Amino acid sequence: MGDAVQLKDEGNKHFLAGDIDKAIDCYCSAIKVCKDKKVLAVIHRNRSACYLKKENFVNAASDASKAIDVDAADIKALYRRCQALEKLGKLDMAFKDVQRCATLEPKNKNFLETLRRLGSEIQAKIKTTFSTDSRVQNMFDILLDDEMEKDKREKAANNLIVLSREDAGAERIFQNNGVPLLLSMIESGKPEMILAAVRTLSGMCTGHKARATALIHTVGVDKMCSIMATDNEEIALATCNLFQCINDSLTGGDKREYGKEEALVLDASKDLKTILLSLLEMVANKKVSGHGRDQALNLLSKNVPRRDKKEKSNSTALFTIDHGLKKILKVCGQVPELPDQLPLTENTQLIASVLLNKLYDDLTCDPERDNFRDICDEYIKSKIDPNNMDKTIHAINTISGLLQGPFDVGNALVGHQGIMEMMVALCGSEREVDQMVAVEALIHSSSKMSRASFIITNGVTLLKDIYKKTKNERIKIRSLVGLCKLGSAGGDDYSLRQFAEGSTEKLAKQCRKWLCNPQIDTKTRNWAIEGLSYLTNDADVKDDFVEDELAMKAMFELAKSKDKTILYAVACTLINCTNSYEKKEILPELVQLAKFSKQHVPEQHPKDKKDFIDRRVKRLLKAGVTSALAVMVKADNSVLTDQTKELLTRVFLALSEDPRDRGIIVAQGGGKALIPLAVEGTEAGKVKASHALARIASISNPEIAFPGERVYEVVRPLISLLHTDRDGIQNFEALRSLTNFAGFSEKLRAKIVKENALPDIENYMFEEHDQIRQAATECMCNLVLCKEVQNRYLEDGNDKMKLLVLLCGEDDADLQTAAAGALAMLTGAQKKLCAKLTQVTAQWLEILQRLCLHDNPRVQHRGIVVVHNMLNSDDGDLAKKLIESEILEILSVIGKAEDNPKRQDVIDVARTCLVKAMELGLIKPFASAS
């Protein structure tokens, strides 16, 4: 018994000291050993207070109830349960508890105020509930009335969607027989009704696991799949969003505390498995529209692979491979020109390839990868049939899909005996569809240098023959792209040109001609960009392309179109034109060694030098490349892969190199477009996007470059560049941009502090590199306006103040300006820091005198402002010490000087210091001449 009381008392001490976790531990230990009911009730009541502090309201209410069970008049326990119940939204129960408190202590103002407030909230809730009920019913009446005017029905549909996005509204729709009425709207078959119903269902289940589970069972997964399968892009997209909302709610999107009811909605694995199997069934179902198939693949791509590779289990990916890989391969192998094919959109097969790539990347060991490759191998072998050419070209097209996805798997299949020869042979087929599929496969398989060499030897003549003889524009462009890719197999190595001088320029000219012809179908023009993405490895081609403004604008317009399969090719073309691809640094010693040993040494094209690159960047900006990039960034995530995002960030970084061009980038929406790229994608891509943001943010008005709340989203990417792993130039530009932000508004300063940037900025104030140290000091100079930063300087046991004083003593005038500016603002805002300044180093007075004597008026002004602040610090001894030093003589000389517009600020502050010294009685007024 003694132990329980002792533990309780110890818990009370921790609670009073603010250490809530230790208090809870003590109370939990006390509860285990306590035998006395009354003491146990007190411990439960105290632990309830701890749980309230930790915002664990379910446990707080539970502990308070246990105390009330022992003593129904325990006023503290009653009030704590009232507080917990209010936070849990159970206002009526909370009202009863505070009503009991007010009865026990009728003069307690706190109880009476809570009673009044809860009463008002309950009345408002009742009023809202009844009004919401009538509004919901009224909306359904309008929507289901066939004779109602169209405008009224559209308005009712929109109101219903808005209402479903509010928790109270969603609950009223659910409780008032809303789901059957929404199903009636879906059964009407009218697209606008179906769309409104699906969007309302999405709103109802967003972030609410219980409602999401109920909707799965009342509406049914099969029914939702059948809605998504309709040939209506908007409905398919809305249903995809509904599935995503359900998935998010079931897998952690719902943060509510259900208490005892949690067991009813906890296990969602069975429902998630049902959804997964249904989506896999949709992938290869002929009854599903192209738009529906796209959305099914999108959902699989987003939710099956692990979002974070640190998660141990990839069981969902393994399950998908076992039950659905062959279905995805079937989509990749579809040839729309053949009869009896699955309905597809222009994006379907690319989305399928991206999904295959994500699934393969999610595998963790060789046996899992071997299983993936075996299933693909088995599928290809089952489709190759010398007596059935349709099945054979399906197999070849499937390999093309794999080459665009998990390249290693596709490459291994191409290496199988007879596959490459079959592709070359199909190029000579009489059927145009065979030629088209085979040429595409050759294009995708020649990414490896060895394959390109094989095709150059065996297939170039064949591709040239097809190009010259065929009258089908679609085959002609594909054979041309094949030649383009083979011609660029040496990359940007000037010494590895595959074709004769001038051949690549001729191919590029033909590609540009097709690209600029609006009479040709979009798919064919897209292939022209594909060709340019290879040919622009050649610097002559790059220069010709950027001089052709019509071709550039045509490419940008296609990049903005609905067909997003072209994004990667556009990104590659821009990467080549700006030379922003990854370059390996070649040491001169290694070059000499390679030449000596007669090894190949890459050569740079004369037009790949910096002045040529800069000119190309200017031409691209003038043609409107930034607005095209901004549209590309908004593409669906399943098409805009992380690799493509990284390419786009590289282009942005190249475009923003010249400070004079950054205004154009901001004006065309580049600042806003970079934010999502800095948040999602590959690690290298996020760093480069953050770097481009830093360049823009360092010289732009934040409100113009990142309008609205977006400016606060930029802070975190900028701070990520302060990491020690980043390059010096990235650290420097991040510090400059944060300096700009910190000088703009108090909210931005608070955001920088909240994101824990101060330790990194302080570390860079010790940096040996002069420019980085100066940038960090300038940033701190702006941040000291923030109260929280000032408090850090007031704390004992650190050298922050000492560092600023010592930096004032450096020889660099810009560094002195920043450090002295920070000192001036700190001593002006916090009088205690005036005294602290004199304690951090014995050299403080000497440094202060040097500032006051500085020949730079900006440094001198800041030094004298520090003196002024010290004289006004209400510390008589400090003021006396200053005046007894040489500071008085310095102030006198400056104060007696004639007015000078260039140094007037300095003169005025010096005179103010002298007046203050006279007021303090430290000096006598100047005697005027008689």
Image (cartoon, rainbow, N blue to C red):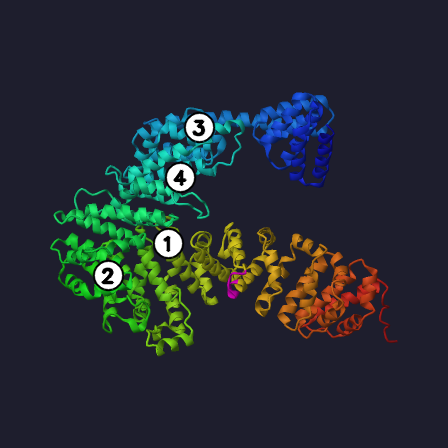
**Are circles 4 and 2 on residues that touch, CB within 8 Å?**
no
**Label 1, on which residue?**
632
Q: Amino acid at mark 3?
A: Ile
Q: CA distance from mark 3 to mark 1?
A: 38 Å
Instruction: Say whether residue 662 is left or right of residue 775.
Output: left
Label 4 sits on a secondary structure element that is helix
Q: Which residue is mark 3?
A: 173
From the viewer's perspective, is the residue at label 3 or at label 2 nearer?
A: 2
Q: Amino acid at mark 1?
A: Met
Q: Which residue is mark 2?
A: 481
First in sequence: mark 3 or mark 4? 3
Q: Quadrant of residue 177?
A: top left
Q: Which mark is residue 244?
A: 4
- Which numbered mark, 1 or 2, is in the foreground of this view? 2
Q: Name the secondary structure under disc 2.
A: helix
Q: Is residue 613 above or below residue 641?
A: below
Whichever of callouts 1 and 2 sits on the residue coming sooner in the sequence is 2
Q: In the displayed structure, would residue 170 be above or below residue 788?
A: above
Across and down, in percent, residue 79 comes to 67, 28
Which region of the structure is painted magenta? 724-730
Marks 3 and 2, how far apart at CA: 56 Å
Which image quadrant: the C terminus? bottom right
User: How many angstroms separate mark 4 from mark 2 (CA)?
Assistant: 38 Å
Label 3: few (<14), some (14–19) or many (≥20) C-alpha neighbours in 10 Å: many
Mark nearest the camera among 3 and 4 is: 4
Mark 4 or mark 2: whose residue is earlier in sequence: 4
Q: Using the rendered image of the protein, determine whether residue 793 is visible from the camera's viewpoint.
A: yes
Q: CA distance from mark 3 to mark 4?
A: 20 Å
Disc on the earlier residue, 4 or 1: 4
Disc 1 to disc 2: CB gap under 8 Å: no
